[in-house]
Image (tube, rainbow, N blue to C red):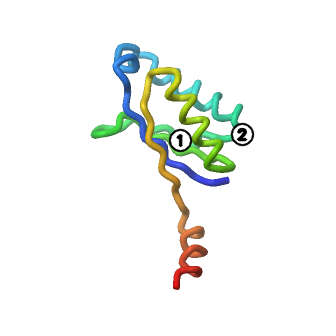
Amino acid sequence: MATYIVLGQFTDQGVRNIQDTSQRADAAKEMATTFGAEVRDVFWTIGQYDVVLIVEAPDDKTVMALGMSFGKLGNVRTETLRAFSQAEIREIMKKVV
C-alpha cells in the first residue's frame, strides 16, 4: 500500500464543533476502512495545518475519494501528499540517470 500525508485545516463548521474533533478522527479511521485504506495515525498540530493524518491506501484514486469524502462532511479542508519511504526512494533513485 502507498503512504499519504493528509494535511487538514478546520473549516468554520469544524471550529464551531471543535469539541467533537477526537470523535471525528475515530470516524475518519472507520471511513477509511470502507475504502480499503487505513488511517495509521492522527496528529493535531500548531501552525498552518490543524490536523495531520498518515494514511495507507492501495492507490491515488482511493485516497482521493477518501479525501473528497472527508471534505464533503464540511469540517475540514485537506491537502494530500504522496509519501515515499526510504526503501522506496532507494528504488526510485536506481532509475535516475
Q: Quadrant of residue 79?
A: top left
Label 2 neighbour load within 10 Å: few <14, some 14-19, many 20+: some
Judged by depth in the image, the label closer to the viewer, 2 or 1, is: 2
Tell me where residue 65 sits by quadrant. top right
User: Tag 1 or tag 2, which sits nearer the N-term?
Assistant: 2
Up/down of 84 relative to 76, above or below: below
Amino acid carrying mark 2 in the image: Gly
Residue 3 percent coordinates (x, y): 58, 52
* Mark seen at residue 18: none
Q: CA distance from mark 2 to mark 1?
A: 16 Å
**Percent coordinates x, y for residue 58 in the rendering:** 69, 49
Q: What label does residue 41 carry, if any?
A: 1
The one nearer the camera, 35 or 18, is 35
Q: Where residue 77 sits in the image (x, y, percent)? A: 42, 31
Q: Residue at x 43, y 41 (%)?
A: 7
Which residue is outermost to the left?
A: 47
In the picture of the structure, the residue carrying the numbered disc 2 is 36
Q: 87 and 79: which one is in front?
A: 79
Q: Residues within 10 Å of mark 1 (few under 14, many from 20)?
A: few
Q: Which residue: 55% across, 63% down?
A: 85
At a point 64% along the width and 45% down the height, the residue shown is 61
Which residue sits at x=37%, y=24%? Answer: 11
Residue 61 placement, left or right of 68: right
Q: Secondary structure at mark 1?
A: strand
